Image (cartoon, rainbow, N blue to C red):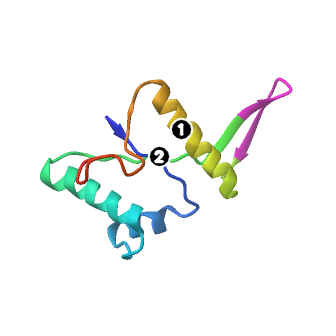
């Protein structure tokens, strides 16, 4: 399986930008091409998983925060997801190094 981890405060906007990226949105253009290549040419599937909050321990007590409004926290979680994927040797497609048209 191949994985892409990203952060956003608006999922609808994120997927609209994937579907109809502006010429300056290189990441969205790249992801659109990869997704279309995977879905149309190879007959593959894509799925989306969304983190809607944070759970952690503080002084031995479980804590939870609903929603992730802060961009810095979302970026921290995005990088934590990438580290977790790398730790289990998953194939990560973030970045420019992956072949065009593949996901």
- Whether residue 28 is situated above or below residue 98 in the rendered picture: below
| 98 or 1, nearer to the observer | 98
Query: In the visual, does 34 lie left or right of 63?
Result: left
Compared to residue 70, the image places residue 3 above or below, namely: above
Residue where numbered disc 1 is placed: 81
Density class for disc 1 (Cα within 10 Å; few <14, some 14-19, many ≥20) is some
Estimate how packed mark 2 is, as few (under 14), some (14 to 19) or many (20 or more) residues with alpha carbons within 10 Å. Answer: some
Q: Is residue 64 magenta?
A: yes
Q: Earlier in the sequence, mark 1 or mark 2?
A: 2
Q: Residue at x 38, y 76 (%)?
A: 22
Asked if the residue at tag 2 contacts the one at tag 1, i.e. Cβ–Cβ closer than 8 Å, the answer is yes
Q: CA separation, marks 1 and 2?
A: 7 Å
Quadrant where the N terminus lies?
top left
Which of the pair 11/96 is nearer the observer?
Answer: 96
Q: Residue 60 colored magenta?
A: yes
Region in magenta: 56-65
- Residue 5, label in figure: 2
Q: Position of residue 49 (x, y in %)?
A: 45, 45
Q: Give how far across and how far down residue 38 sits, in percent.
A: 22, 50
């Amino acid at each position: 399986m191949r994985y892409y981890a990203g952060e956003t405060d608006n999922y609808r906007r994120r997927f609209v930008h994937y579907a109809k990226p502006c010429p300056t949105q290189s990441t969205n253009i790249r992801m659109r091409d990869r997704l279309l290549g995977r879905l149309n040419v190879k007959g593959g599937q894509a799925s989306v998983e969304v983190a809607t909050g944070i759970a952690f321990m503080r002084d031995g007590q479980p804590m939870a925060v609903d929603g992730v409004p802060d961009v810095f926290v979302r970026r921290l979680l995005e990088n934590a997801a990438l580290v977790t994927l790398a730790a289990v040797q998953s194939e990560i497609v973030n970045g420019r190094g992956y072949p065009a048209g593949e996901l």
